[in-house]
Amino acid sequence: MGDRWHVEVDRSVCIGSAMCLNHAPDGFTLDTARQSHPRHPDSDANEKVLAAAEGCPVEAITITLLDSGEPVFPPEE
């Protein structure tokens, strides 16, 4: 079995660009205020969700390993 991720969107940072929907339409949804929400906050590792996090213009999406909390994106410096 592969890694399990916890995905969060910082809605105080999210600008509603919907880039995450372009990369991972099954991974994110926008609410009526155009704020992004992960459809499945705890899920299997997914390259499209990672691409969405990497493509977010304001880096509002964070991904951590579900079991350890270790950062997946953004990576630790």
Image: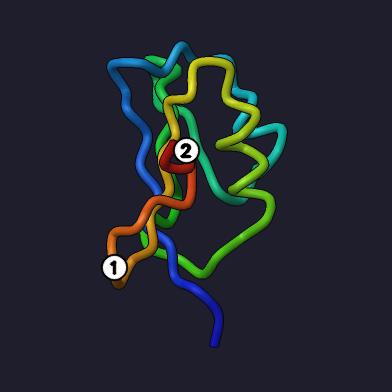
Percent coordinates x, y for residue 55 in the rendering: 65, 28
Dot 1 falls on a residue whose secondary structure is: loop
Badge 1, how many Cα within 10 Å: few under 14, some, many 20+? few
State the quadrant of the C terminus: top left
The foreground one among 30 and 57 is 57
Q: Quadrant of the N terminus?
A: bottom right
> How dense is the environment of label 2, judged by Cα within 10 Å: few (below 14), some, or many (20 and up)?
some
The answer to whether residue 39 is left or right of residue 50 is: left
Reading the image, the residue beneath label 2 is 74
Amino acid of disc 2 = Pro
Residue that sits furthest to the top in the current view: 15
Q: Give the residue displayed 40% in from the left and 27% down from the top.
A: 31
| Residue 47: quadrant of the picture | bottom right
* Residue 30, percent from left and from top: 47, 29
Residue underneath mark 1: 68
- Of labels 2 and 1, earlier in sequence is 1
> What residue appears at the point 56 percent right and 37 percent down from the top-left corner?
53
Residue drawn at x 68%, y 50% is: 48
The amino acid marked with disc number 1 is: Ser
